[in-house]
Image: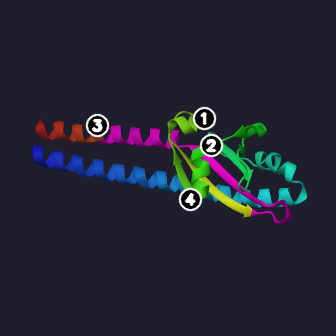
Amino acid sequence: MIVAVAAGAGLSSWDADREAARALTEFGAEQATLARALGAVVTASAEVDPRQVLSAVEAVPRPTDTVVLVRREAAGSFLGPGGQALAAPPVAAAFARGDAVTRLGRPEAAALGLPPRTAWAGLARVDAGAAGRWEIAVVASAQRLRDRDRAASRRLVGSIAGAAVLVLV
């Protein structure tokens, strides 16, 4: 019986970990979708006045714990909230590799003003005609997602422990 409970716990834990990884991948894809959508805002505003790109992007509602970075392609730094220049080396490296999504560690997320937790950046490039090519990164903290996964894991362990105690009794 102990082996059966342990096997059930192992399989359930493996499945929960697999589901958490899938949820994080989908979370990153959502950021990439938002970055592509913001690309239309960048294109429209850059064609009118390239200096207005950041204010146009900041006017678009987005989830909390999300930072949008924009820059002209090959510029040194990104423009972040309030026009603040940010280096964001992991994001720049992801653009250089041609990635659509990249994961940021705790220190990189904190450097962007997000909670010091894992974050995902969705990336998009747009051509704004005469205003040049622009790069947009939507960086979002995965804190709430990870907290939900951990709570689900605790519930799973509690359920299995409860079932084991009932069988033992």
Residue type, label 2 = Ala
Looking at the rendered image, the disc whose residue lies closer to the viewer, 4 or 3, is 4
Mark 2 is surrounded, within 10 Å at the Cα level, by few (under 14), some (14 to 19) or many (20 or more) other residues, namely some
How far apart, in angstroms, are the residues tagged by discs 1 and 4?
21 Å
**Which of disc 3 and disc 4 is earlier in sequence?**
4
Secondary structure, mark 2, is loop
Secondary structure, mark 4, is helix
Q: Which residue is mark 4?
A: 97
Q: Is residue 133 above or below residue 5?
A: below
Residue 88 circle label:
2
How far apart, in angstroms, are the residues tagged by discs 4 and 3?
43 Å
Going 63% across and 59% down the picture, which residue do you hit?
Answer: 33
Residue type, label 3 = Gly
Going 70% across and 45% down the picture, which residue do you hit?
Answer: 77
Q: Nearer the viewer, residue 126 or 163?
A: 126
**Which of disc 1 and disc 2 is earlier in sequence?**
2
Location of residue 153 by image quarter: top left
Q: Which residue is mark 3?
A: 158
Q: Does residue 9 show up magenta in the picture?
A: no
Residue type, label 1 = Ala
Looking at the rendered image, the disc whose residue lies closer to the viewer, 3 or 2, is 2
Q: Which residue is mark 1?
A: 111
Secondary structure, mark 3, is helix
How far apart, in angstroms, are the residues tagged by discs 3 and 2?
41 Å
